[in-house]
């Protein structure tokens, strides 16, 4: 057999080995050989060769073994294209037989030889011959006859003697590992990890350095970083007289690597070997351009490198590792940016359940807002506020949230709902607040009247019981697991600064409150892309005035009520403008139907009747009259602005007066006013006329001139289709992809979660269209709206301000159709900034 055969390849500097044909482990070993590191002789089997072995076509075993030293035991390890795809476990000590056992007994002593042989028989029996592992349970591993016991057990169970020829043993191992990879369960398991259905497996056959014998012998693993933090730290363990990863086994009498006050170390026991290991690791980091974990063996004081694998790491460690590699000049900054999965930043931005902490999962739902938080269960917004006033963390539990719950969400540590999807009210508001949230948790039984949650296993959690909501994984946990805090450290800041230098699309934040705006500033958003003004009306002192306006019969009465809200709105906008310091702020005029501001239960109706000095029957009748069969498609948005124009008049005046107030103290403010739910050109004309009139009145009253920009929220299919006639009245279009998706599909974004997973699993939709923008359908409307709008208004600014604005896949599409900026929840701004940078870098590479 040739040494550089393409399918059975002795690994040398020039051997034809590639990750795509032989797997990552084989390629890494070749790189270590090129670095002249002490790697035992190794043969790599290609994906094609392993596939043939699985089909029963065996290579010439004697020729394969001839490539390795005849006196050595050998091991076989898997080599898949991506180590995360898994594979069969390594088999050590192949070639161990009666003759070799007798020889090693003389060389290293009977006890060590017995351990080697018995371990191999046991491993071969279970993983190759597929025998019952229980047959070894009663064996005394310390007995002088342990090997004979193991051989007898094998022969009894397999009804044939244990194979003694190394070629036969190796053939059995190769066949077993090849067939295990191609089995149905293994294929489904790796496909779940993202592997293609036809992913191949390579195998590496390597001479063994035993790690047993005279002098200092043993094995261990070493790496140069902490896998949780990414900080420089020599970690790993070493165990004398051991093989493989024995040093990591629970209960093993392993040594630390560096000197450590907690116990003995390899540095003290074998200082020369320790220094050699550090030097090898530093060289691998520099030349392989990655933090690597080394698997090593020491034989009579000499170090041998058996394998090198990329260090497993948390998201926060991944950021620090990539940044350190770039700052050390090992990789360019662009590559550091490309190495970080944008969504992984959520782990840095929010508290997370410690990966090492035990999880008592009591229910699951849709992971709607990342992060984790612990608190006592409360079942109403009022109870959440009371809990916050006592300084107690709480989890707000609701069937589904509505605008009245916003105050409770502000007070809560996390939110859990029975219903809803990724763009439901609870999900959108929680992401804006940076609040962990799980929605659609239908695995739990919500008993709101009894103030109880019943789990699938029968456990009942009541008000005041402690639970944890993990909005990153969609899990609800019992009790208080250990947490990892958010980590916006220097490495994160460096990565984000590099991203901003690369990206070619702006990222704004959806922000409704001063706290949201401050978060947006902290995350270096390019302004506010969506301020939903209706959320400002739910404070207790404003809600009653809002209800007075709703119950007013005449325009003058409505205007009188709104005059009380005017200074409050003006102060809100002034603070937003000051926080954003001259950056653009896009304010959406009032959008929701009026019934959302009215109570629905008997007690609330009675309180409202008392506040308005009206009979309860009149209040009940009026509330019923304002109800709609389908309020999301009813009297809301621009329709409300045209039929009850006093609301938009008040808001426009508040915006302009706030513009003047904020401009006195800082950079000039140019507010952006957005009209929601437009579907017709005439709607824009009517609202624009009134807004222009209010602007003229404010200029006359104050003697101060100012500019503003007027635009529309394109969230109906008709607005996108008729964009050419709408655009001449606008400075900008902002595509509201949440509602646009809802109307294009005819789906309720609050209810779609009930069947969406089944639809995605069965391939009806490739992804949840509320989570990842549907570029074929909804995207076609965006493209048409953008093209037609700019046909009649070439300087039209285009943006996307739905939750899709924070999705990397959606940002890619937005860049391609000429969108100027995306806007997303404040805590998704870093994700969008990094995703935009990666897309720009990849465009340059291609």
Image (cartoon, rainbow, N blue to C red):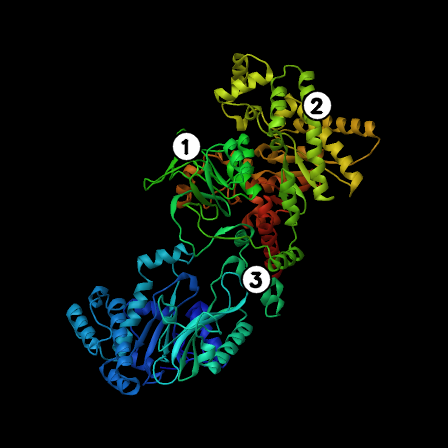
Q: Secondary structure at mark 3?
A: helix
Q: Is residue 821 visible?
A: no
Closer to us: mark 1 or mark 2?
1
Question: In the image, is 166 to the left or to the right of 341?
Answer: left
Q: Which residue is mark 3?
A: 320
Could you classify mark 2 by the number of other residues whose Cα lies within 10 Å: few (under 14), some (14-19), or many (20 or more)? Answer: some
Marks 3 and 1 sit apart, C-alpha to C-alpha, by 45 Å
**Badge 1 is on which residue?**
451
The picture quadrant where one finds residue 756 is: top left
Residue 83 seen anywhere in this rendered image of the structure = yes
Residue 528 percent coordinates (x, y)? 66, 42
Instruction: Estimate how packed mark 1 is, as few (under 14), some (14 to 19) or many (20 or more) residues with alpha carbons within 10 Å.
Output: some
As measured in the structure, the alpha-carbon distance from the residue carrying label 2 to the one carrying label 3 is: 53 Å
Which quadrant of the structure image shows residue 286? bottom right
In terms of secondary structure, where does tag 2 sit?
helix
Horizontal side of 331 relative to 47 (left or right) equals: right
Quarter placement of the N terminus: bottom left
* Residue with the mark numbered 2: 563
Quarter assignment of residue 842: bottom right
The mark nearer the N terminus, 3 or 1, is: 3
Q: Height in image: 753 above or below 702?
A: below
Q: Is residue 58 above or below residue 551?
A: below
């Amino acid at each position: 057999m040739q040494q550089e055969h393409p399918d059975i390849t002795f690994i040398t500097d020039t051997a034809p080995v590639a990750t795509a044909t032989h797997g990552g482990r084989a390629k890494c070993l070749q790189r270590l050989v090129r670095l002249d590191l002490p790697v035992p002789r190794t043969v790599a089997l290609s994906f094609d060769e392993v596939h043939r072995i699985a089909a029963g076509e065996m290579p010439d075993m004697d020729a394969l073994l001839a490539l390795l030293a005849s006196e050595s035991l050998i091991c076989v390890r898997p080599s898949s294209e991506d180590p995360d795809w898994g594979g069969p476990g390594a088999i050590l000590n192949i070639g161990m037989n009666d003759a070799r056992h007798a020889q090693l007994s003389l060389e290293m002593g009977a006890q060590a030889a017995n351990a080697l042989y018995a371990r191999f028989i046991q491993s071969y029996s279970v993983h190759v011959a597929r025998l019952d592992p229980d047959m070894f349970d009663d064996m005394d591993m310390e007995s002088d006859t342990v090997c004979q016991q193991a051989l007898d057990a094998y022969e009894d169970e397999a009804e044939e003697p244990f194979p003694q020829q190394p070629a036969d043993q190796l053939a059995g191992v190769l066949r077993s590992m090849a067939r295990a990879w191609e089995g149905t369960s293994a294929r489904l398991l790796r496909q779940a990890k993202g592997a293609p259905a036809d992913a191949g497996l390579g195998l590496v056959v390597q001479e063994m350095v035993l790690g047993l014998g005279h002098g200092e012998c043993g094995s261990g693993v070493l790496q140069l970083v902490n896998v949780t933090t990414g900080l420089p730290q020599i970690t790993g363990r070493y165990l004398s007289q051991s093989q493989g990863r024995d040093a990591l086994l629970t209960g093993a009498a392993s040594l630390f690597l560096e000197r450590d006050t907690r116990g003995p170390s390899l540095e003290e026991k074998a200082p020369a070997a320790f220094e050699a290991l550090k030097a090898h690791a530093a060289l691998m980091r520099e030349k392989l351009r990655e933090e690597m974990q080394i698997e090593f063996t020491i034989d009579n004081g000499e170090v041998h490198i058996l394998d090198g694998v990329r260090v497993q790491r948390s998201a926060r460690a991944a950021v620090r590792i990539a940044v350190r590699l770039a700052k050390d000049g090992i990789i360019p900054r662009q590559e550091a940016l490309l190495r970080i999965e944008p969504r992984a930043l959520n782990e840095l931005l929010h508290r997370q359940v410690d990966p090492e902490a035990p999880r008592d999962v009591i229910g699951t739902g849709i992971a709607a807002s990342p992060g984790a938080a612990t608190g006592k269960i409360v079942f109403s917004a009022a109870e959440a506020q009371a809990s916050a006033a006592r300084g107690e963390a709480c989890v707000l539990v609701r069937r589904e949230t509505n605008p009245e719950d916003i105050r409770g969400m502000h007070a809560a540590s996390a939110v859990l709902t029975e219903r809803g999807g990724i763009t439901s009210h609870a999900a959108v508001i929680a992401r804006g607040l940076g609040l962990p949230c799980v929605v659609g948790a239908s695995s739990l039984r919500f008993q709101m009247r009894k103030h109880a949650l019943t789990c699938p296993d029968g456990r009942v959690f009541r008000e005041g019981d402690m639970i944890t909501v993990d909005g990153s994984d969609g899990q609800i946990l019992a009790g208080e697991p250990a947490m990892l805090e958010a980590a916006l450290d220097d490495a994160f800041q460096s990565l984000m600064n590099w991203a901003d230098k690369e990206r070619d699309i702006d990222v704004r934040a959806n922000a409704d409150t001063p706290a949201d705006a401050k978060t947006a500033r902290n995350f270096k958003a390019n302004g506010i892309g969506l301020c939903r003004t209706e959320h400002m009306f739910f404070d207790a002192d404003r809600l009653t005035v809002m209800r007075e306006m709703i119950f007013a019969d005449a325009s003058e009465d409505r205007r009188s009520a709104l005059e009380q809200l005017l200074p409050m709105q003006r102060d809100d906008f002034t603070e937003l403008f000051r926080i954003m310091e001259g950056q653009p702020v896009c304010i959406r005029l009032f959008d929701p139907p009026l019934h959302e501001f009215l109570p629905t239960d008997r007690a609330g109706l009675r309180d409202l009747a008392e506040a308005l000095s009206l009979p309860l029957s009149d209040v009940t009748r009026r509330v019923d009259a304002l109800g709609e069969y389908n309020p999301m498609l009813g009297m809301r948005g621009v329709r409300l602005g045209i039929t009850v124009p006093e609301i938009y008049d008040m808001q426009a005046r508040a915006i302009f007066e706030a513009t003047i107030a904020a401009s006195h103290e800082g950079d000039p403010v140019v507010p952006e006013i957005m009209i929601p739910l437009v579907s017709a050109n005439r709607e824009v004309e009517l609202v624009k006329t009134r807004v222009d009139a209010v602007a003229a009145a404010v200029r006359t009253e104050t003697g101060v001139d100012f500019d503003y920009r007027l635009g529309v929220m394109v969230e109906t299919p008709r607005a996108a289709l008729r964009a050419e006639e709408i655009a001449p009245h606008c400075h900008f279009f902002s595509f509201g992809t949440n509602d646009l998706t809802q109307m294009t599909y005819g789906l309720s974004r609050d209810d779609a979660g009930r069947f969406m997973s089944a639809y995605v699993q069965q391939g009806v939709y490739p992804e949840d269209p509320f989570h990842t923008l549907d570029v074929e359908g909804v995207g076609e409307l965006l493209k048409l709206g953008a093209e037609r709008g700019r046909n009649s208004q070439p300087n039209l600014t285009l943006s996307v301000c739905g939750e899709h604005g924070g999705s990397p896949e959606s940002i890619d599409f937005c860049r391609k159709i000429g969108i100027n900026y995306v806007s997303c929840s404040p805590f998704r701004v870093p994700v969008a900034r990094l995703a935009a940078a990666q897309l720009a870098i990849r465009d340059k590479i291609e």
